[in-house]
Structures are given as C-alpha cells and as structure tokens.
Image (cartoon, rainbow, N blue to C red):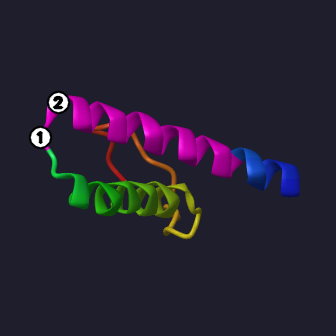
Amino acid sequence: MRNQKEHANSDILEMTTEIVSSYVNANEIKAENLSELIRSIHKSLVTLSKDDFEKPTEKPRPCGQSI
C-alpha cells in the first residue's frame, strides 16, 4: 500500500511540475508569486486525486431512454 501511495505522490509532483512549467512558459508571473502558484496547483491535484467525492448511485442510461 505504501508503494502505491508513494507512486501517487510522485505522479502528483510530476503533474504539478508539468503544469507549472507550461503556465510559466505561456504567462508572465512575478517571482514572488511562483510559490503560491505551485502550492495552488499541487493542492488542486491532491484534491482531485482523492476518492472522497460522491459516486453516482445508479447507472447512467443512454439519452432518450425512458425510466
């Protein structure tokens, strides 16, 4: 389990690096704002990676299919 968690953390760090790099290459940002950008992106990715959100209770149906 620990190995899986370390792998997930590594993936999040890698994605954070890629997103920050792409953003900085395309946008002008002051050096003093860079750490907050990194923190914000990392926090968003961690939040998205958690499985705490509500899962649908019923299976989706194709459009046009009545109940």
Q: Nearer the viewer, residue 30 or 66?
A: 30
Tag 2 secondary structure: helix
Q: Residue at x 51, y 60 (%)?
A: 46
Q: Quadrant of residue 33?
A: bottom left
Q: Is residue 1 left or right of residue 53?
A: right
Q: Quadrant of the C terminus?
A: bottom left
User: Magenta stretch containing residue 29, yes or no?
Assistant: no
From the image, give the main secondary structure of the stretch colored magenta. Answer: helix
Q: Quadrant of residue 49?
A: bottom right
Q: Position of residue 11 (x, y in %)?
A: 61, 41
Which span is picked out in magenta?
8-28
Tag 1 secondary structure: loop
Q: Residue at x 56, y 70 (%)?
A: 52
Q: Amino acid at mark 2?
A: Ala
Disc number placed over residue 28 in the picture, else none: 1
Q: Quadrant of residue 41?
A: bottom left
Q: Residue at x 25, y 37 (%)?
A: 23
Q: Position of residue 18 (x, y in %)?
A: 42, 34
Question: Residue pushed farthest left?
Answer: 28
Q: Position of residue 55 (x, y in %)?
A: 52, 63
Q: Is residue 50 left or right of residue 8?
A: left
Judge the density around disc 2: few (<14), some (14-19), many (≥20) Cα neighbours within 10 Å. few
- Residue 44 in view, yes or no: yes
Q: Nearer the viewer, residue 56 or 61?
A: 56
Q: Nearer the viewer, residue 46 or 29?
A: 29
Q: Amino acid at mark 1?
A: Glu
Image height of 56 relative to 21, above or below: below
Q: Is residue 26 left or right of residue 41?
A: left
- Asked if labels 1 and 2 touch by Cβ distance under 8 angstroms, the answer is no
Q: Which residue is denoted by mark 2 in the rendering?
A: 26
Q: Residue at x 76, y 51 (%)?
A: 6
